Amino acid sequence: MLRVEDLDVWFGHPPERVDAVKSACFAVRPGESFGLVGESGSGKSTILRAIAGLIDSWSGRIEVAGAAVAGRRRSRGFHKTVQMVFQDPYASLHPRHSVDRVLSETLRLQGMDRIDARTARLLDQVGLGRGFRFRYPHQLSGGQRQRVAIARALAAEPKLLLLDEPTSALDVSVQAEILNLLADLRRDRGLTYVMVSHDLAVVAHMCDRLAVMRQGRIVEKMDAARLRAGAAQSDYARALIAASAGYLRQG
Amino acid sequence: MNPLLSVRNLRVAFPTRSGRFEAVRGVSFDLGRERLGMVGESGSGKTMTGRAILGLVRPPGEVAADRLELGGEPILNLPESRLRRLRGARISMVMQDPRFSLNPVMTVGRQIMEGYRLHTGTSRAQARDKALEMLAAVQIRDPERVFDAYPHEVSGGMGQRIMIAMMLAPDPEILIADEPTSALDVSVRNEVLRILDRLVRDRGMGLIFVSHDLNLVAQFCDRVLIMYAGRVVEELPARDLHAARHPYTRGLLDSLPRLDRPVRRLAVLQRQPDWRDAPPEGTP
């Protein structure tokens, strides 16, 4: 579904050039859920943004459903296949557009028919009743906004969802609801996920396999069982898992 | 012995267009020389409780309590001039995000010195020594360099350690830390916690640790208050948090994915209307 080879991403020009991602390689099978984990600045979100076409300073190869992409240009077909959900539901929705407008505009852009019926169905699919259709973002809680953002991503009937810390801004009880929703959608629609998170427990719950990143490089790839067992091979991944397990009091 | 801080029936309310909103509805606790965790979701009133103790609730917000005492002295609704002498000197607060609480156009060193001199009236040279000593105390490796740096030149984790250094320079009896590690990476988080831990142990400081992270509070604190809708719904020793009885606390714990306990589906919290007013769990 997705193949990334020798991906380099940089920002700025020498001598101030920053290499945010260095020769990253990974592949994600159709229907699989793949996690990218690491600390802030490790380059995990940058990989998603390069795939989505939000960054043009990259080299290497990105292939989605067998077709290579270039620079920032993405075809109409690409956006029908790939959609992204961002971390902050407060920032990713236009404050003066109603839920109805957000969804119907997206559907129209994707060239869909029966806009009205599809908008209603999208709301059902993300567990928001019809009553939410004419509300504005400030009338929604964080979890409800993230549901709208997921509905917007689903409008194109994509195959691959890029999820950038989709629950980091939410309370734990709301996080559980959104993670359950994402798991249901993947199962029901055979979606493929690439999920970025700093929370190893969330990634272990949601993903089949994952890559641990540090300073722009993928230091290790493993499956979720290995992560749960704390059986990473590299020192860095082991240290990250140990630190995530929490704080050990002394004395 | 008197507790460092004693709070009885603390209430905070704001008038809104749709009526009075009660953000804190009768919170009571005593704080000794310990790490007291205060957990709950957004809107549960935990931050507002901390702000009310420090006298940081601005009008039209109203603060009331049957008792609010610092070392036996009433501090409720003191005039601003007297509060200024308490804040920083005897009781301090570290906020979640250092990017919003440090002055962006003043060097780190000058900011630490300013607060310290205000409360102690020492000379510039003494204040400088103290600032460097505090930066070293929070494990900053090159205090001289950081002293002359501006906030945008340091990382988030270092910014948070600078905040802690600044708050602790006047040697307060109580520190209220509001989500001090939520914006930090795990490795830095554990370092900041170690610093706070040592301060409680070595200086006998009282720490109120406000957090939404139940596992972290269970590991780090001595005692925990669980807040819901402006009230304490349960109080228990931190090591017993995983055996909590209140359905809200249980619901929060169960909704967390865990590395050591795979589940097919995460439990979803079902909120009950009576949690708002039932007496807290663990009280006679």
Image (spheres, coloured by chain):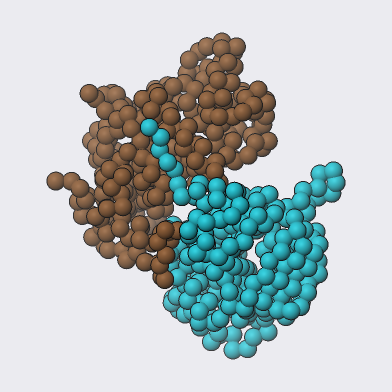
Chain colours: A cyan, B brown
Residue A97 visible in the current orientation: no
| Residue in the picture at 61% in, 52% down | A234
Q: Residue A89 in the image: x percent, y percent?
A: 55, 62
| Residue in the picture at 20% in, 54% down | B278
Front position in the image: B45 or A173: A173
User: Residue A108's image quarter?
Assistant: bottom right
In this picture, residue B197 sits left or right of residue B130: left
Q: Residue B246 in the image: x percent, y percent?
A: 25, 55
Number of disc labels = 0
Q: Is residue B45 above or below residue B259?
A: above
Q: Quadrant of the C terminus of chain A?
A: top left
Q: Residue A150 in the image: x percent, y percent?
A: 55, 71
| Residue in the picture at 56% in, 12% down | B126
User: Residue B159's image quarter?
Assistant: top right
Front position in the image: B233 or A209: A209
In this picture, residue B87 sits left or right of residue B233: right
